Amino acid sequence: MARSDRLALAVIAAIAGLALAACTGAEPDRDESGVITESVEGADVFALVVGDCTGDITEGGVLTELDAVPCADPHGAEAYASIDMDDGDFPGDEAVQTQADDGCVAEFEAFVGLPYDDSELLSTYLTPTEESWAQGDREILCFVYDDGGPTTGSLEGAER
């Protein structure tokens, strides 16, 4: 599959609904440095931060929970960047997706060590919905993943 096709699939997955909704899940257990220490099914998406690893997030739909996993264990994705959108009225789904596409690709190289177009890894994101925006949510959370399956350890500096 061509790189541009893979990017389109990642973007389509994100556009299909990897969006945030009202919080309902659990808080992951963390050590004193903030690293997740134990897997938790159904972690609140608002409790996830850069450096956290999760189960598979490439499915569509509005997400309120994700499995949070220590990065040392096999996992589906890793949060690598957080982008705060400007306050104001909800800019619309298309504007949110455009900022997420641009922002996550811009942050990708600094994390992975290769430009997005040269990497075999993919990126997707969680974005505010109109509902979560009304509750103060302005965060786009970028994730890196390997389309080939789960990874173990961080993908920071993976250069692949």
Image (cartoon, grey):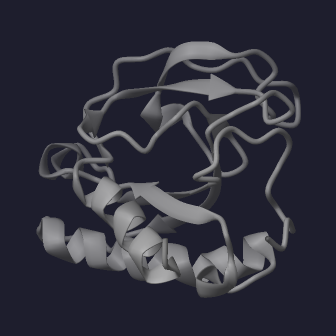
- Judge from the rendering whether residue 105 lies leftward or rightward of residue 11; answer left or right: right
Q: For residue 27, which quarter of the picture?
A: top right
Location of residue 113 with respect to 57 vertically, above or below = below
- Judge from the rendering whether residue 75 lies leftward or rightward of residue 136; answer left or right: right
Which residue is more in the foreground, 12 or 49?
Answer: 12
- Judge from the rendering whether residue 42 lies leftward or rightward of residue 137; answer left or right: right
Location of residue 100 with respect to 114 vertically, above or below = above
Residue at point 20% right, 50% down? Answer: 129
- Numbered label tally: 0
Q: For residue 158, which quarter of the picture?
A: bottom right
Q: Judge whether residue 14 can be spotted in this image.
A: yes
Residue 135: where, in percent of width, then height? 23, 43
The quarter in which the C terminus is drawn is bottom right
Which residue is more in the foreground, 121 or 65?
Answer: 121
Residue 88: where, in percent of width, then height? 19, 71
Residue at point 75% right, 79% down? Answer: 110
Location of residue 130 with respect to 81 vertically, above or below = above
Q: Judge whether residue 87 can be spotted in this image.
A: no
Residue 60: where, in percent of width, then height? 28, 42
Residue at point 24% right, 48% down? Answer: 17
Q: Residue furthest front?
A: 1
Which residue is more in the foreground, 14 or 88?
Answer: 14
Residue 71: where, in percent of width, then height? 79, 36
Residue at point 69% right, 34% down? Answer: 75
- Judge from the rendering whether residue 147 lies leftward or rightward of residue 113; answer left or right: left
